[in-house]
Every structure is written in C-alpha cells, then in structure tokens.
Image (cartoon, grey):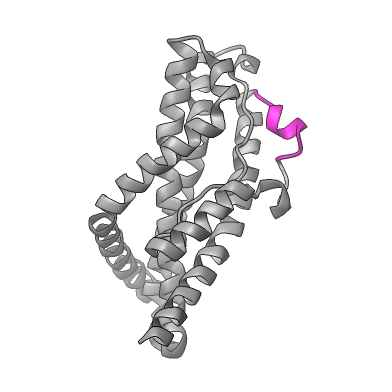
C-alpha cells in the first residue's frame, strides 16, 4: 500500500511538473505579447516575450507547487509575474485596453482552457483513447492535470486582476501593488486554492461533459465529410 501511494505521489508530481513548465512559458509569452498589442511594452522590453522556460519560472511559485502536490495531491503554484504598466496605454479605447491589460493573465489562461477543451473533444471524436488503450490513462491523467492547473491560474489571475484594477483605477495605489505584489499574490494563492478545491469536482465534471458533447458533434461532422 505504501509503495503504491508513493508511486501515485511520484506520478502526480511528474504530471504537475510536466504541466507547469509549458503552461507558465506559453502563458507568459502570450501575456507579454498581448500587453504589447494593448500598448504596454514593459514586459516585452524586459525580455518576457520569449519561449525560454527559465525566464518564466518562479522559484517561489514552483516550490509551492511541489509542496502542495506532495501534501494535498493538488499542485498549485505560478510562474514569474509579467510586469505591466497601465500608464503606458494612451489613445483610443484607453479605458477598455487598460481593463484588458489588468485581466490579460486571466484572458490568456481562459484561452488555454478553451483550447484544451477543444483538444480533448478532438481526442474524443477521433477515438484516440480507444485505439491506444495502453496510453489512455496516462493521456487522461496529464490532460486533467494541465486542465486543472490552468483553471487554477485562471481563477488566480481573475482575483489578481480585480485587485490591481481596483487599486489602480479607484484607490490610485498602483505603485503599492507593484511593491507588495508578491505578498498579495501569496494571499490570493490561498484564496484561489480554496475556490478551486471547492468547485473543482463539479467544474471538472461539467468540463468533461462538454468535451464528450463537443467530441460527439465533431465526430458527426468528420463522418459527413470523410464518410
């Protein structure tokens, strides 16, 4: 029993690390790119628009990820915070673009979650797991871990974005957020952890139902197109 538990813990840790590095790298790159498109090139100038994982790894966030995975089996952490400066945004639709900047992290992770749902639906439609039963458990385990990790980061960045928006636009304390951003992030980390822990079983069940439904319709379209 102990050996089996140890093996499960090791597999879970490997899976969350496999999810962590590509997730923080891709999301960090696109958040820097999105911010530049909105008019704030702070992250771009500081070299965050890169696919180098070392630029996007947060040692503190990675440490919490490993610790939470080993303790609870639900690994949550974060990557390097992408520096943003809303005061760089000028011109038309300035207010809208500033709001999008505050929530850029949530937008990116929302897009990743949506892409994962489509990817899972495509696997379902093509019956990939049926044709490769030996690998199906590994594929599904990794898919669940990556999906959960991105849902957690979506919640985390929604809360952080809301806090930064209020502190900047209403309290005019943007510099205060920049100064104490790490401590704010740690507090929000636990808030997001609680939210995800409570709603995750229901949310994940709903998402996999969506995957099955979308996969069914993709399969019908493929049958019509290719017989």
Q: Residue at point 38% right, 62% down? A: 72
Coordinates of residue 201 in the picture (x, y in percent)? 25, 59
In which quadrant of the rendered image does the N terminus lie? bottom left
Within the magenta stretch, is there residue 46? yes
Q: Residue furthest front?
A: 2
In which quadrant of the rendered image does the C terminus lie? bottom left
Whether residue 119 sits left or right of residue 196 in the image: it is right
* Count of all numbered marks drawn on residues in the image: 0
Would you place residue 191 above or below residue 92 in this image?
A: below
Q: Nearer the viewer, residue 217 or 156?
A: 156
Q: Nearer the viewer, residue 213 or 30?
A: 30
Coordinates of residue 96 in the picture (x, y in percent)? 48, 19
Would you place residue 10 above or below residue 97 in this image?
A: below
Q: Is residue 224 among the parts visible in the rendering? A: yes
Within the magenta stretch, is there residue 201? no
Q: Magenta stretch: give its range.
A: 40-48
Q: Is residue 116 among the parts visible in the rendering? A: no
Quarter assignment of residue 75: bottom left
Quarter assignment of residue 191: top left
Q: Residue at point 27% right, 54% down? A: 203
Q: Residue at point 41% right, 89% down? A: 133
Q: Nearer the viewer, residue 203 or 17?
A: 17
Coordinates of residue 77 in the picture (x, y in percent)? 50, 50
Q: Residue at point 39% right, 59% down? A: 117
Would you place residue 84 above or below residue 25 in this image?
A: above
């Amino acid at each position: 029993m102990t050996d089996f538990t140890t093996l499960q813990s090791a597999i879970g840790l490997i899976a969350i690390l496999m999810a962590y590095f590509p997730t923080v790298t891709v999301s960090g790159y696109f958040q820097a790119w999105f911010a530049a498109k909105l008019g704030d090139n702070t992250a771009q100038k500081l070299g965050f628009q890169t696919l180098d994982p070392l630029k996007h790894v947060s040692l503190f966030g990675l440490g919490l990820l490993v610790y939470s995975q080993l303790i609870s089996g639900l690994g949550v952490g974060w990557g390097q915070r992408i520096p943003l400066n809303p005061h760089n945004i000028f011109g038309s639709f300035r207010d809208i673009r500033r709001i999008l900047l505050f929530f850029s992290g949530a937008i990116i992770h929302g897009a990743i979650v949506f892409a994962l749902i489509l990817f899972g639906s495509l696997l379902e439609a093509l019956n990939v797991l049926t044709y490769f039963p030996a690998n199906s458990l590994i594929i599904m385990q990794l898919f669940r871990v990556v999906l959960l990790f991105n849902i957690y980061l979506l919640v985390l960045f929604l809360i952080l974005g809301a806090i930064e928006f209020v502190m900047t636009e209403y309290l005019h304390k943007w510099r205060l957020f920049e100064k104490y951003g790490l401590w704010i992030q740690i507090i929000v980390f636990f808030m997001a952890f609680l939210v995800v822990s409570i709603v995750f079983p229901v949310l994940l069940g709903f998402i996999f139902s969506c995957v099955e439904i979308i996969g069914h319709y993709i399969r019908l379209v493929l049958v019509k197109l290719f017989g």
